[in-house]
Image (cartoon, rainbow, N blue to C red):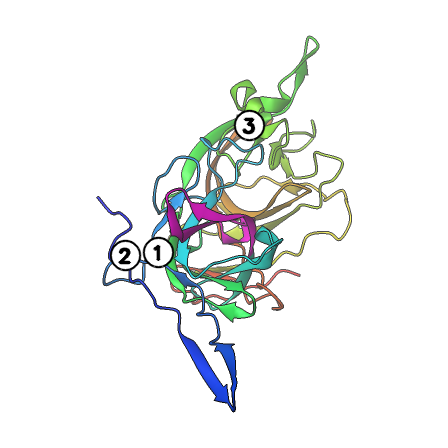
Amino acid sequence: MRTISTLLTLSFQVILVITGTECVRAQAPAPAPTLLTEENSARAIALDSVTQVRDPLPVVALNNLSQDRRTRLALFGINVDLSSGENASAVTATARDSRSRSYSLKVEFVGKVPKLDWLTQVVVRLPDELANAGDVWISINLHGQTSNEVLFNVKVQSEPRRVTLPARRITNGQDNYVDAAFSFEFGMNGVGALSLTRNDWDILFGNRPDRDTFGVTMVVDDRSRIRDLGALNWGDSFQVPVIPAYPVPTNEPDVDAIVGHMYVVHTKDTDTDLYALFRVEALEPGKSVTISWKGVQSPEGGIGGSPSEGACFSTCLARRRVL
């Protein structure tokens, strides 16, 4: 069992400067904050703040007690001492991914661990941009001093999943909307998913009676986008393109459902900013579609960065960009 261990007690140095008969006490600079890691490792001692489970952890967690279902990560450190009157806003946190893109993590709590006054807990919210990111390096900053970087693993969806969606139809006054829609964020649809999705979905199939199409505009604040990448298999080499969200809520045109084609969806609204891929595996015109899907990390740039060429799939021999 991995626990917090092997901690060093750091002495606080005081220097006396003698000038004539006066004695002036000068204080050495406060030591930089240090995040704790496992023994002989750079991997963070960090837990889900609710479930107390360690990594890998997803950005979106179904068993999370918060309304937004986003994972809160508890980091542990020393020399993280707030001044009188300060709160969690005095501490900032940053994550760096495998492509050296940096992301700001919202710090929601900073406080001493009960009965361990030398140990501070820092709780951060994992942002949507880190979904499916894999290993990231996390650091904090307090009073202008930056801590060491510690390694943390964001859970990755390793294999595509399948789902069959009926075309949306209203029959005898009954609308099957929640069955024709799907949430990549939570990986589910139907009436049983409403408590999580709050009727906010990522795609909708068969909303037009004359064509088999996918749509992504379903709520008033939707700025989502969808693009058909053409005929692709999951084992092919290709780039996940950057598809900038609309700057304001906009109705994105539907795209045709074509067997064997891969699609990228950028879900963007007030609560969500996620990317996903899906492929049409089977289509029964006017009735249903079977898709395989996978959440992927956003290919967009991090703090102060510009969008990258896109996230790699397979060996990235083919490079694409959608504007």
Q: Earlier in the sequence, mark 2 or mark 1?
A: 2
Q: Earlier in the sequence, mark 3 or mark 2?
A: 2
Magenta residue span:
105-131
Real-space Cα separation, disc 3 to disc 1, in angstroms: 30 Å
Q: Residue at x 71, y 41 (%)?
A: 222
Looking at the image, residue 213 lies above or below residue 141? above
Q: Quadrant of the C terminus?
A: bottom right
Q: Position of residue 228 (x, y in %)?
A: 59, 49
Q: Amino acid at mark 3?
A: Leu
With 40 as the anchor, is 317 left or right in this view? right
Q: Nearer the viewer, residue 270 or 3?
A: 3
Q: Earlier in the sequence, mark 3 or mark 1?
A: 1
Q: Nearer the viewer, residue 154 or 204?
A: 154
Q: Position of residue 60 (x, y in %)?
A: 49, 40
What residue is pinned by disc 1? 44
Q: Position of residue 279 (x, y in %)?
A: 49, 43
What residue is pinned by disc 2? 38
Q: Residue at x 62, y 53 (%)?
A: 85
In the drawing, what numbered circle is on residue 52? none
Helix, strand or loop at mark 3: helix
